[in-house]
Image (tube, rainbow, N blue to C red):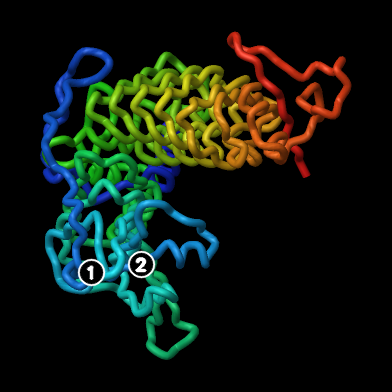
Amino acid sequence: MKKKILGVLLTLVLAVTGFGLVGCGGGNNPAPGPGPRPGPEPAPVVSYDDDTTPVAIDETGLLFDLWTQERMEEDGWGNIPDYNLAYVYAVTEEVVDLVIPAYVTDGENEYKVVSIENLVFTIDNVDDFNYTGVNELATGIKTITIPSTVEWVYGLADWYNHQETPGDNDSWVEEPYYLENLESIILNNRTADINIYDCFGVLCDAIIARESPDAETEERIAIFLEIINQFCTHDEENDLYYLGNPGNPYMLLVMAGLTYRPDDEFAEAEELVANVNGNCKIIGGGSFDSSAVTEVILPNGLVTIGLNAFNYCWALENVILPNSVVTIGDSAFAYCYALESVILPEGLEAIWDYAFNDCNNLEELVIPTTVKHIGYNIVSENSTVLYVDHDLAEELAGCGAEVVYVLKTIVDEAEEGVYPFDYRSVMVTYDPEEEDNVERVFEHDGKEYYGFCLVRE
């Protein structure tokens, strides 16, 4: 049984949530002391904000891939309002403490920096993504300071394909590389959304592959725990690991620890409550993936539920999101088979792909009027219905719901042809061509709705 739980933990923690050689700026931060529910004593909040003045690209020491609005439209990405986008691809000069700017300018356009792609490789041609070798200029980096504009971080580790014997096409080998001197990642105190899912999973795997390639399962887990305890702050009372800036190590929750991993997958869950620290703004990607948690207490101030954050939490029955939550990431609550109730707050803006997919006990989801984006298959066919009180006609076609109920007044006031958009009646749904004796108006919570069923091909 012990070997089984270790194997499950290794797979989940290393491949899904993985972590390594990063932290909150000080490897010896003490674990927070016990505090009253709903969490431990909050860490001190420090003042650390983005400098929003655009930095000239040739003064950054970085190589960027720049996407103007025109280029994005030409490549089929659509028009992104307000700012053009910039991706960091490489360090172009030797640096120890790397500070990523929030905005850069090429003298003509200003760009918002949204991604750190792969500092560990030498980039010959950004347009062709031609990685030719290990970027030696990056190996001395000890700290990376990330502004709140950055949404994704990659490139702290990867596998480098090269020829063991130059010129010999049969001698290609694969070797893991990572930023070997990296000590900490410092997040901005206003960070709203950063996804570490890919970055740290590959990083931890690369470290073990380089330093202990023959380690057995238990030894690999021990190495992992040694890494994470050295570079994260561990809330021992709740067995949660946090990453943040030096004054606020609780900003980003990166892993729920051994307490939350069952002896047997899908074992009968005990009452297992996770208290998230009051200063936490982000539940990181895969933090609770496949855990046996039955309840999660989320603080007001939380902004983002990351990719796969509660994926396969089969014992989780009810979720109440605080009013501060703005984004629910891809597959955040997917495969939560016991989930029966979710209260989405006003203020929520985006629900991304598969967020509640295969939550087959979730009968309904009321979409707040602040939601601007609904992803693909956010819920499952033939299980969940959506109630929508505002105009989301263009967002709903692929939502995956069995039925979408749209507020009657919204449909009545819409221009001709907008509704039933990409839906048609397969039950008692709104169809102005039908006879008067066909029921087409439904009541829910004192409001009148038209019901639409998705056309499935």
Image x and y of residue 48, in percent: 13, 42
Name the image quarter holding the C terminus: top right
State the separation of the CA atoms marked 2 and 1.
10 Å
- Left or right side of 292 for 429: right
Going 37% across and 69% down the picture, which residue do you hit?
175
How packed mark 2 is, by other alpha carbons closer than 10 Å (few <14, some 14-19, many 20 or more), is many
Q: Quadrant of residue 288?
A: top left
Going 31% across and 29% down the picture, which residue do you hit?
302
In front of the other: 312 or 49: 49
Image x and y of residue 178, in percent: 28, 62
Which amino acid does the dot numbered 1 rest on? Ile
Residue at label 2? 66
Q: Is residue 277 visible?
A: yes
Is 223 drawn above or below residue 332 in the view shown? below
Nearest to N terminus: mark 2 or mark 1: 1
- Left or right side of 90 for 158: right
Task: Tell me the element at label 2.
Answer: strand
